Amino acid sequence: MQTVNVRHTIAAPIEKVFEILADHANYKLLPGVKDSKLIRMGTPVKNGVGAVRWIDVGKARFTEEITRFEPPTRLDYQITKSFPPIQHKCGIVRLERTPGGTVVSWTSTVELKIPLIGKLLTPLLASEISKGFTHMLEAIEKRLVKAS
C-alpha cells in the first residue's frame, strides 16, 4: 500500500473550506471531476457520518462512505467500491485554522488491486491521486478567493 499526503494552505476561512470539501455536490464543480452524487444521506446532516458518495473522475470512479465528520476540522472516508479496483485503508482530511486562512492536510492510503501488475502500478496511482488532491485544493482556493 502507498500513502499519499498533500498539504495546502488556502487563504479563506476554515468554515468555507470545510463546507466545500464536505459537500459532494461541489465536487462536480472542480476540475477533473465529471460527476458526483449523494447515494445515501448521513447523520446528523446529509454529508455527515454514513453518507455515501459516488464520484466520477473520468479514468476512475469510486464510491466512498464518510466515517468521521467533525466540522470544520476533520472529514474521514473509506472507498468501498472503485474502478479500477483499489484497496483503500483510509482517507483523512484535516483542516487547521491559521492567521493566513486554512491549512488542509489530505492523506489517503491505497493499493491498486490488479493481479500481477497492481503493486507495480500503485506508485503511479499514488502520484495521480496526489496531483488530483492538489488540483482540487487549488481550485477551491481560487473559488473562495474570487468570492471574497
Image (tube, rainbow, N blue to C red):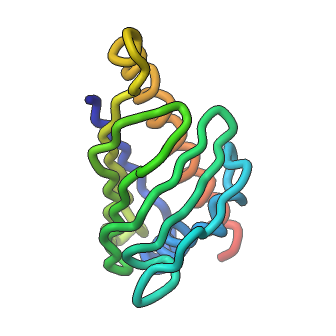
Q: Residue visible at 47% across and 36% down?
A: 129
Is residue 12 found left or right of 67 in the rendered image?
A: right
Q: Write the residue at 32% across / 78% down.
A: 70
Q: Is residue 105 above or below residue 32?
A: below
Q: Residue 92 occupies which quadrant of the picture?
A: bottom left
Give the image location of residue 11, x and y in percent: 49, 65
Q: Nearer the viewer, residue 92 or 51?
A: 51
Residue 7 x/y as whole percent: 36, 48
Residue drawn 42% across the image and 63% down it:
65
* Residue 65 vertical position relative to residue 3 in the rendered view, above or below: below
Kindly identify the residue that appears in the image at 49 percent across and 66 percent down.
Answer: 52
Vertical arrangement, residue 130 with respect to residue 120, above or below: below
Is residue 96 positioned above or below 81 on the image? below
Image quadrant of residue 88? top left
Percent position (x, y) of residue 132? 54, 40
- Viewport quadrant of the C terminus: bottom right
The N terminus: image quadrant: top left
How many numbered circles does the render carry?
0
Q: Position of residue 6 (x, y in %)?
A: 37, 44
The one of 5 and 52 positioned closer to us in this rendering: 52
Work out which residue is located at the far front of the displayed protein and give it. Answer: 115
